[in-house]
Protein backbone atom coordinates (compact mmCIF):
# COMPACT_ATOMS: atom_id res chain seq x y z
CA UNK A 1 0.00 0.00 0.00
CA UNK A 2 1.28 3.44 -0.79
CA UNK A 3 2.30 5.53 2.19
CA UNK A 4 -0.05 8.35 3.08
CA UNK A 5 1.04 11.92 2.60
CA UNK A 6 2.22 13.75 5.69
CA UNK A 7 1.49 17.06 4.02
CA UNK A 8 -0.79 17.70 1.11
CA UNK A 9 -1.32 21.21 -0.18
CA UNK A 10 -3.88 21.80 -2.93
CA UNK A 11 -4.80 24.83 -4.94
CA UNK A 12 -3.45 27.27 -2.36
CA UNK A 13 -4.14 30.92 -3.11
CA UNK A 14 -2.75 33.60 -0.84
CA UNK A 15 -2.90 37.34 -1.21
CA UNK A 16 -1.52 40.33 0.64
CA UNK A 17 -3.58 43.47 0.84
CA UNK A 18 -1.72 46.71 1.44
CA UNK A 19 -2.91 50.30 1.22
CA UNK A 20 -1.64 50.53 -2.35
CA UNK A 21 -2.48 47.21 -3.91
CA UNK A 22 -3.36 43.55 -3.66
CA UNK A 23 -0.45 41.15 -4.23
CA UNK A 24 -1.42 37.70 -5.45
CA UNK A 25 1.49 35.86 -3.85
CA UNK A 26 0.36 32.24 -4.34
CA UNK A 27 -1.90 31.25 -7.21
CA UNK A 28 -2.98 27.67 -6.86
CA UNK A 29 0.09 25.97 -5.36
CA UNK A 30 -0.01 22.24 -4.74
CA UNK A 31 2.49 19.78 -3.31
CA UNK A 32 2.72 16.47 -1.46
CA UNK A 33 5.26 15.22 1.06
CA UNK A 34 5.39 11.75 2.58
CA UNK A 35 6.99 10.95 5.94
CA UNK A 36 10.77 10.85 5.70
CA UNK A 37 10.75 12.63 2.36
CA UNK A 38 12.65 15.81 1.54
CA UNK A 39 11.17 18.35 -0.86
CA UNK A 40 13.09 21.35 -2.13
CA UNK A 41 11.29 24.44 -3.34
CA UNK A 42 13.08 26.66 -5.85
CA UNK A 43 11.94 30.06 -7.01
CA UNK A 44 13.25 33.52 -7.70
CA UNK A 45 12.94 36.25 -5.11
CA UNK A 46 9.31 37.14 -4.49
CA UNK A 47 8.07 33.83 -5.91
CA UNK A 48 6.24 33.06 -2.67
CA UNK A 49 8.46 30.51 -0.86
CA UNK A 50 8.28 32.24 2.51
CA UNK A 51 4.58 32.92 2.02
CA UNK A 52 4.01 29.19 1.54
CA UNK A 53 5.98 28.34 4.69
CA UNK A 54 4.12 30.96 6.72
CA UNK A 55 0.76 29.73 5.39
CA UNK A 56 1.45 26.19 6.62
CA UNK A 57 2.09 27.44 10.15
CA UNK A 58 -0.72 30.01 9.84
CA UNK A 59 1.69 32.83 10.57
CA UNK A 60 0.78 35.19 7.75
CA UNK A 61 0.67 38.83 8.91
CA UNK A 62 -2.74 39.56 10.43
CA UNK A 63 -5.16 41.66 8.36
CA UNK A 64 -2.62 41.76 5.51
CA UNK A 65 -1.99 38.19 4.37
CA UNK A 66 -5.03 35.99 3.67
CA UNK A 67 -5.53 32.48 2.35
CA UNK A 68 -8.23 32.85 -0.30
CA UNK A 69 -8.61 29.27 -1.39
CA UNK A 70 -7.18 25.81 -1.05
CA UNK A 71 -6.31 23.33 1.65
CA UNK A 72 -3.27 22.37 3.72
CA UNK A 73 -3.80 18.83 4.94
CA UNK A 74 -1.29 17.76 7.59
CA UNK A 75 -1.62 14.17 8.80
CA UNK A 76 -5.24 14.09 7.62
CA UNK A 77 -6.35 17.43 9.12
CA UNK A 78 -6.81 20.69 7.24
CA UNK A 79 -4.67 23.19 9.15
CA UNK A 80 -6.66 26.05 7.64
CA UNK A 81 -9.72 24.81 9.55
CA UNK A 82 -7.98 24.19 12.89
CA UNK A 83 -8.78 26.38 15.89
CA UNK A 84 -6.13 29.01 16.60
CA UNK A 85 -5.31 27.59 20.03
CA UNK A 86 -4.89 24.20 18.41
CA UNK A 87 -2.17 25.56 16.15
CA UNK A 88 0.09 25.88 19.19
CA UNK A 89 0.29 22.10 19.28
CA UNK A 90 1.53 22.06 15.71
CA UNK A 91 3.95 24.98 15.84
CA UNK A 92 7.33 23.95 17.20
CA UNK A 93 6.13 20.50 18.16
CA UNK A 94 4.74 18.61 15.16
CA UNK A 95 5.88 21.17 12.58
CA UNK A 96 8.98 23.21 13.10
CA UNK A 97 10.55 25.99 11.07
CA UNK A 98 14.06 27.30 10.56
CA UNK A 99 14.21 30.87 9.34
CA UNK A 100 16.75 32.55 7.10
CA UNK A 101 18.61 34.60 9.68
CA UNK A 102 19.65 32.83 12.90
CA UNK A 103 19.93 36.13 14.74
CA UNK A 104 16.24 36.83 14.38
CA UNK A 105 15.35 33.36 15.69
CA UNK A 106 17.57 33.42 18.77
CA UNK A 107 17.00 35.53 21.85
CA UNK A 108 20.19 37.58 22.35
CA UNK A 109 19.58 37.87 26.10
CA UNK A 110 19.18 34.18 26.82
CA UNK A 111 21.84 31.47 27.16
CA UNK A 112 21.67 29.05 24.24
CA UNK A 113 21.07 26.03 26.48
CA UNK A 114 18.10 27.76 28.09
CA UNK A 115 16.65 28.46 24.65
CA UNK A 116 16.70 24.77 23.81
CA UNK A 117 15.25 23.92 27.24
CA UNK A 118 12.47 26.48 26.73
CA UNK A 119 10.91 24.68 23.76
CA UNK A 120 11.16 21.34 25.58
CA UNK A 121 9.38 22.84 28.60
CA UNK A 122 6.70 24.41 26.42
CA UNK A 123 5.79 21.09 24.80
CA UNK A 124 6.58 18.83 27.72
CA UNK A 125 3.95 16.15 27.05
CA UNK A 126 6.17 13.41 28.48
CA UNK A 127 6.49 15.32 31.76
CA UNK A 128 10.27 15.30 31.69
CA UNK A 129 12.00 16.43 34.89
CA UNK A 130 14.41 19.38 34.89
CA UNK A 131 17.27 16.89 34.97
CA UNK A 132 15.94 15.01 31.95
CA UNK A 133 15.41 18.28 30.08
CA UNK A 134 18.97 19.32 30.86
CA UNK A 135 20.20 15.95 29.57
CA UNK A 136 18.19 16.40 26.38
CA UNK A 137 19.69 19.88 25.89
CA UNK A 138 23.17 18.31 26.03
CA UNK A 139 22.11 15.62 23.56
CA UNK A 140 20.75 18.19 21.11
CA UNK A 141 23.94 20.27 21.28
CA UNK A 142 26.07 17.19 20.70
CA UNK A 143 23.89 16.21 17.77
CA UNK A 144 24.53 19.49 15.98
CA UNK A 145 28.23 19.40 16.83
CA UNK A 146 28.47 22.01 19.57
CA UNK A 147 30.41 21.23 22.77
CA UNK A 148 28.00 20.97 25.70
CA UNK A 149 30.24 23.27 27.78
CA UNK A 150 29.07 26.09 25.53
CA UNK A 151 25.45 25.85 26.65
CA UNK A 152 25.83 28.72 29.11
CA UNK A 153 27.09 31.07 26.40
CA UNK A 154 24.97 33.74 24.74
CA UNK A 155 24.29 33.84 20.97
CA UNK A 156 26.76 36.70 20.35
CA UNK A 157 29.56 34.43 21.55
CA UNK A 158 28.91 32.05 18.63
CA UNK A 159 29.85 32.23 14.96
CA UNK A 160 27.11 32.47 12.30
CA UNK A 161 27.29 28.76 11.50
CA UNK A 162 27.20 27.84 15.19
CA UNK A 163 24.18 30.07 15.76
CA UNK A 164 22.35 28.35 12.90
CA UNK A 165 23.29 24.98 14.47
CA UNK A 166 21.69 26.14 17.71
CA UNK A 167 18.57 27.15 15.77
CA UNK A 168 18.50 23.68 14.22
CA UNK A 169 18.94 22.08 17.66
CA UNK A 170 15.94 24.08 18.90
CA UNK A 171 13.85 23.19 15.86
CA UNK A 172 14.59 19.47 16.22
CA UNK A 173 14.36 19.28 20.04
CA UNK A 174 10.70 18.25 20.02
CA UNK A 175 11.26 15.76 17.20
CA UNK A 176 8.91 17.40 14.69
CA UNK A 177 7.30 15.32 11.97
CA UNK A 178 7.78 18.14 9.49
CA UNK A 179 10.72 20.53 9.39
CA UNK A 180 10.37 23.59 7.16
CA UNK A 181 13.65 25.30 6.38
CA UNK A 182 13.33 28.65 4.65
CA UNK A 183 16.76 29.37 3.18
CA UNK A 184 18.45 28.14 6.36
CA UNK A 185 21.93 28.86 5.06
CA UNK A 186 21.56 32.15 3.18
CA UNK A 187 23.11 34.15 6.01
CA UNK A 188 26.14 31.85 6.16
CA UNK A 189 29.32 31.76 4.11
CA UNK A 190 29.69 29.04 1.50
CA UNK A 191 31.77 26.48 3.41
CA UNK A 192 29.55 26.75 6.47
CA UNK A 193 26.50 26.47 4.21
CA UNK A 194 27.73 23.08 3.03
CA UNK A 195 28.41 21.96 6.60
CA UNK A 196 24.94 22.93 7.81
CA UNK A 197 23.20 21.29 4.83
CA UNK A 198 25.23 18.09 5.22
CA UNK A 199 24.39 18.05 8.89
CA UNK A 200 20.67 18.38 8.18
CA UNK A 201 20.77 15.49 5.70
CA UNK A 202 22.72 13.43 8.20
CA UNK A 203 20.27 14.21 11.01
CA UNK A 204 17.34 13.26 8.80
CA UNK A 205 18.85 9.84 8.14
CA UNK A 206 19.71 9.31 11.78
CA UNK A 207 16.32 10.41 13.09
CA UNK A 208 14.52 8.21 10.56
CA UNK A 209 16.59 5.13 11.50
CA UNK A 210 17.59 5.53 15.14
N1 LIG B 1 3.73 41.47 4.40
C1 LIG B 1 3.60 41.62 3.08
N2 LIG B 1 2.83 42.60 2.55
C2 LIG B 1 2.66 42.73 1.22
N3 LIG B 1 3.23 41.94 0.32
C3 LIG B 1 4.02 40.95 0.75
C4 LIG B 1 4.25 40.73 2.15
N4 LIG B 1 5.07 39.67 2.30
C5 LIG B 1 5.35 39.25 1.06
N5 LIG B 1 4.72 40.01 0.13
C6 LIG B 1 4.78 39.83 -1.33
O1 LIG B 1 4.43 38.49 -1.65
C7 LIG B 1 5.24 37.98 -2.71
C8 LIG B 1 5.93 36.71 -2.26
O2 LIG B 1 6.88 37.01 -1.23
P1 LIG B 1 7.73 35.92 -0.46
O3 LIG B 1 8.40 36.59 0.67
O4 LIG B 1 6.83 34.77 -0.14
O5 LIG B 1 8.78 35.47 -1.59
P2 LIG B 1 10.06 34.50 -1.46
O6 LIG B 1 9.92 33.49 -2.55
O7 LIG B 1 10.19 34.00 -0.08
O8 LIG B 1 11.25 35.49 -1.83
P3 LIG B 1 12.79 35.50 -1.31
O9 LIG B 1 13.50 34.46 -2.11
O10 LIG B 1 13.26 36.87 -1.63
O11 LIG B 1 12.79 35.21 0.17
C9 LIG B 1 6.18 39.13 -3.08
O12 LIG B 1 5.65 39.79 -4.19
C10 LIG B 1 6.17 40.02 -1.88
O13 LIG B 1 6.40 41.36 -2.23
MG1 LIG C 1 11.68 34.17 1.39
Image (cartoon, helix red, strand yellow):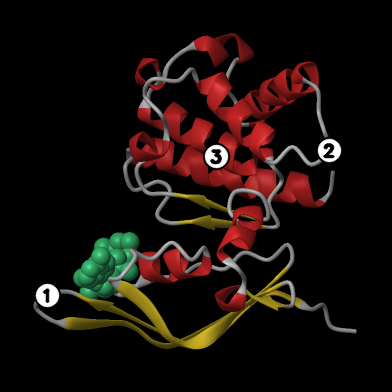
State the image quarter where residue 169 is shown: top right
Residue drawn at point x = 51 percent, y = 33 percent: 165
The residue to which callout 2 is attached is 126
Residue 110 in percent (x, y) is at 45, 20
Identity of the residue furthest to the right in this view? 1
Residue 75 in percent (x, y) is at 73, 72
Q: Is residue 125 visible?
A: yes
State the image quarter where residue 37 is shown: bottom right
The residue to which callout 3 is attached is 168
Q: CA distance from mark 3 to mark 2?
A: 21 Å
The response on whether ligand 2 sits within 8 Å of label 2 is: no
Q: CA distance from mark 1 to mark 2?
A: 47 Å
Question: Element at badge 2?
Answer: loop
Q: CA distance from mark 3 to mark 1?
A: 37 Å
Question: Element at badge 1?
Answer: loop
Determine whether label 3 and label 2 are within 8 Å by CB: no
Residue 19 image label: 1
51 to 30, vertically: above or below: above
The mark closer to the camera, 3 or 2, is: 2
* Left or right: where 60 falls relative to 4: left
Amino acid sequence: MEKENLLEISNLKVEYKTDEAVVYALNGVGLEIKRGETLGLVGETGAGKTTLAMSILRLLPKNVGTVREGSIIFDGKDLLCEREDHMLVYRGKRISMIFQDPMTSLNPLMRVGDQIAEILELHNDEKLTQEQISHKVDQMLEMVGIATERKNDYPHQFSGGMKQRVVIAISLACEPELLIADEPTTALDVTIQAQVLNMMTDLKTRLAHP
